[in-house]
Image: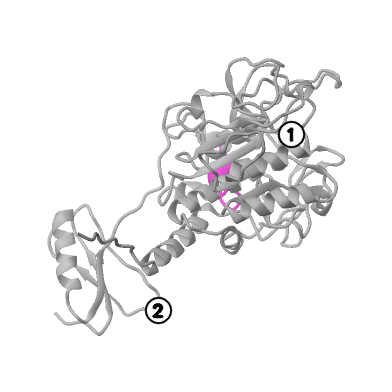
Amino acid sequence: MTFDANALVSLHGTANIQNRLALPGRNAEDIILDRAVSEQELARIADTIARSPAVEYAVPEKIERIQQVNDPRYAEQWDYFKAATGIRLPQAWNHSGGKNVVVAVLDTGVRKHADLIGRLLDGYDMVEDLTRSNDGNGRDPDPTDPGDWCPSEFDSKSSWHGTHVAGTISAVRNNNLGGTGVAPEASILPVRVLGRCGGSSFDIADGIRWAAGVQVAGVPDNPTPAQVINLSLGGPGACDSDYADAIRAARLRGATVVVAAGNSDIDAAGFRPANCEGVVSVAATNVDGARAYFGRRGAGSNFGTSVKIAAPGGETLILTNGILSTLNDGIRDPGNDSYQFYQGTSMAAPHVAGVLALMYAVYPTMKPDEALSILRSTSQPFPTVASRQCDTSTCGAGIVNAEAAVVEAATRGSRVAATTPTSTSTSRP
């Protein structure tokens, strides 16, 4: 058997393994065996063929399947798998689960929900003001969410917001419980920066620094710096110097900072820290791929040229069109583990943070600017809708595509690994 120079050979087995390599534009040749062989024998044949000087490589075909999930409420997580408007997550799981990646969640803290067991690292409580903290002390090593209800607001309830965000990023998959997270093997670093009636920008900026491994006065160093920092928070106004400095410091440490674009149905250029330089600002789309609307005038996903990308944020006008994730059923004080549908750019941002975790797992040396470039270049186009149409001037480059982003990150990671010299050491007598 002879081959043209630099041939690419694929083998087809007639057993339960079928093999094929499709490389458009390359000189590829298929071989179909006339008998059934084992997987080991097929690999041996491919190796023998690959030794020919005229063959670039020979590989058996591998049949990939969408990852199956046994979590009972996974079917309600349309945001992961719905055609055209979901993030193509099951396909991405064929390549990465986010293992060995740390995602910091700067939020209200987190409850130790059963669906987050094994995912929570030791974080920190950065809320300094005793009135706002609602836990009887200031900054301390316990990021547990005691409740964020606001006494000055009528009928205020605790949101357990940080627990919901954490679940979207990394709830456990295949544990026969609830739903799953985008990066179910990633670790969550909870950093509590929001308390009663909100949070101080000073606490948030210090939280960004600490999460990335930057020293913060009066606080022990973070032993597990994050590659991804999620900020599902913000308010109206310009990006001030404190935020800008903290984000710059985090990026210098290699962390990609993801920020919710805001829920005021306005241009995100007037909403901080989504308008800060260097962040990945995320708009929210609904189940149809339109810019999300949250049920009343002035409540919808922010938009504009400062938005970098979009992700599902849901709409709870129809409850099940929201984003399902982990929660607590306590009204003000903590109660029991639960699940709930939420809506907002706060729910969109952790989808992107989770996809970044999948990417970092296959490309650990990826820099923040390259991470954003991959997210944008691999995103899905916005579908055509009757109202609240997204386009690249309002909702970013497109809807985040987990599969394409992870594949591209893996390709680049492999290329970097192949060109990085292996260090050796020698000993002298």
Say whether residue 59 is left or right of residue 216.
left
For the residue pair 217 and 1, the one nearer the viewer reads as 217
Q: Main secondary structure of the magenta part?
A: loop
Which mark, by number, is residue 150? none
Q: Position of residue 376 (x, y in %)?
A: 61, 61
Secondary structure, mark 2, is: loop
Please say whether residue 339 is visible from this viewpoint: no
Q: Position of residue 373 (x, y in %)?
A: 60, 63
Q: Position of residue 186 (x, y in %)?
A: 48, 41
Secondary structure, mark 1, is: loop
Asked if labels 1 and 2 touch by Cβ distance under 8 angstroms, the answer is no
For the residue pair 346 and 417, the one nearer the viewer reads as 417
Residue 259 in the image: above or below residue 136: below
Three-letter code for the amino acid on which mark 2 is drawn: Gly
Residue where numbered disc 2 is placed:
25
Please say whether residue 103 is visible from this viewpoint: yes
- For the residue carrying disc 1, how many other residues have a C-alpha within 10 Å: few (<14), some (14-19), or many (20+)? few
Query: Does the magenta-highlighted stretch encompass residue 256?
Result: no
Residue 164 in the image: above or below residue 32: above
Query: Does the magenta-highlighted stretch encompass residue 83?
Result: yes
Which mark, by number, is residue 317? 1
Q: Which residues are magenta?
A: 77-87
Three-letter code for the amino acid on which mark 1 is drawn: Leu
Q: Residue at x 72, y 54 (%)?
A: 385
Q: Residue at x 57, y 62 (%)?
A: 370
Q: Residue at x 32, y 67 (%)?
A: 21
Q: Position of residue 118 (x, y in %)?
A: 45, 30
